[in-house]
Amino acid sequence: MNIGVVCYPTFGGSGVVATELGTYMAALGHKVHFITYSQPVRLNILEENIYYHEVNVHDYPLFEYQPYELALSSKMVDTVLNEGIDLLHVHYAIPHAYAAITAKQILKEKGINIPVVTTLHGTDITLVGRNPSYKPAVTYSINHSDVVTSVSESLKKDSLKFFVVRKDIEVIPNFIDPSLYDVNNRELRCNLVEPHQKLVAHVSNFRKVKRVEDVITVFHQINAKIDSKLVLIGEGPERERTEQQAKSLGILDKLIFLGKTNEIERVLCMSDLFLLPSETESFGLAALEAMAAGLPVISSNTGGLPEVNVHNKTGYLADVGDVTAMANYAIDILSDPQKHEALRKGSLARANEFTVESILPRYLDVYERALNLVK
Ligand code: GMT
């Protein structure tokens, strides 16, 4: 197949899933064309069967907002025509699904019926898409896609609740590649913590929805009982506030900010516990990645997180904002080596239920069905 992939090229979960899915498809021999405004961060452009088409938005002083969807639709049309693309897979509904449906209509006039697969990832439905300014366009894009997938049952339920969906939504969970996690490699741990200290980790895009303030509060309570450090991976608007909060609690020296590092797997493998207290999370890819590194996860019990993190097996779930419960669970795990080991085994086993080998055939099946639908 010749597949066109549209995603956000940034560090967000949807971009990561799109890039990795495309990369594994390319390894199977399919040609994969990424159509994005900059090179996806985890994309290796030199790999066989991977192509990159940049969407250029021309700046014009008349526009307060540059028409990105227009440029994206046009690029999709051109790429389909020039490269003989068989199928478009768009990740994140806004504005990708909308732009793809426009491209589909333009191509129809040229006698080409291109199938569009839309994958809903989370905030495109639960936060942004629901906004009245976008809702009619998102509804239209979902209903005009040939196949719609969502990354969790919870997100499917939310999509059906917030939109009038006439399409079947197929749940295909996110995935990890276990071979990327050298779980027993703690070689550089000594650069982050003293041998007696515990290392707690958090990975996010530091947006409000992640409740990074809860990460700090929970860590503050952990650190009062157990000498530890908190490693924070990622960047985003809440980062500065996080620093201020840590400073006012007197624990800034216990925080290690690594920013947008490409060493996520390695850092996770040398950590002891993962915190994800998000307000909402359609899936929680960061939690799954932590589990693949053998970390017990303490998360909120919101959205799709309970579909990933299993209470008392891979870690613990607590109500959103219940920082005391989260801290107590963390202290319990970090002070009981047997419990830690049991949860570590639980995490590794659970992560193995989400391997790329098991998920990839499901997307291939979706692609085949989408192709058949337009025949
Ligand atoms: O988490 C984010 O804010 C980024 C966002 C994205 O679309 O890039 O993540 C969403 O998609 C991920 C991949 O499917 C999911 O693992 C995240 O749970 C989901 N985020 C939210 O629902 C907040």
Image: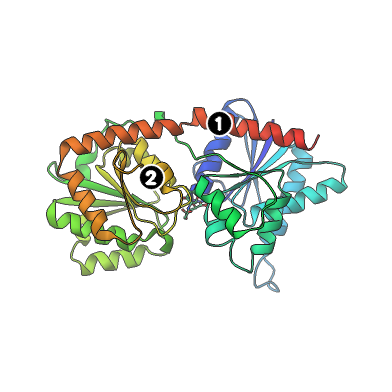
Q: Hey, which quadrant is residue 248 in on the image?
A: bottom left
Instruction: Please report whichever mark, 1 or 2, sits nearer to the chain's N-terminal start.
Output: 2
How many numbered circles does the render carry? 2
Q: Hey, which quadrant is residue 86 in on the image?
A: top right
Q: Helix or strand or loop: what does disc 1 sit on? A: helix
Q: Residues within 10 Å of mark 2 (few under 14, many from 20)?
A: many
Q: What residue did someone put label 1 on?
A: 360
Q: What residue did someone put label 2 on?
A: 287
x then y, percent, for residue 103: 76, 50
x then y, percent, for residue 357: 50, 27
- Disc 1 marks a residue whose amino acid type is Leu
Q: Is residue 190 above or below residue 162?
A: above
Of residues 248 and 218, which is closer to you in this image? 218
Q: Is residue 279 above or below residue 317?
A: below
Tell me, yes or no, if residue 9 can be seen here.
Answer: no
Indicate the quadrant containing the C terminus: top left, top right, bottom left or bottom right.
Answer: top right
Of residues 95 and 339, which is closer to you in this image? 339
Q: Is residue 191 above or below residue 318?
A: above
- Disc 2 marks a residue whose amino acid type is Ala
x then y, percent, for residue 58: 69, 61
In the figure, is residue 231 to the left or right of 53? left
Q: Helix or strand or loop: what does disc 2 sit on? A: helix
Q: Is residue 74 above or below residue 211?
A: above
Report the disc number at residue 13: none
How far separated are the C-alphas under marks 1 and 2? 20 Å
- Taking the spot 68% from the left edge, 72% from the top edge, the residue there is 61
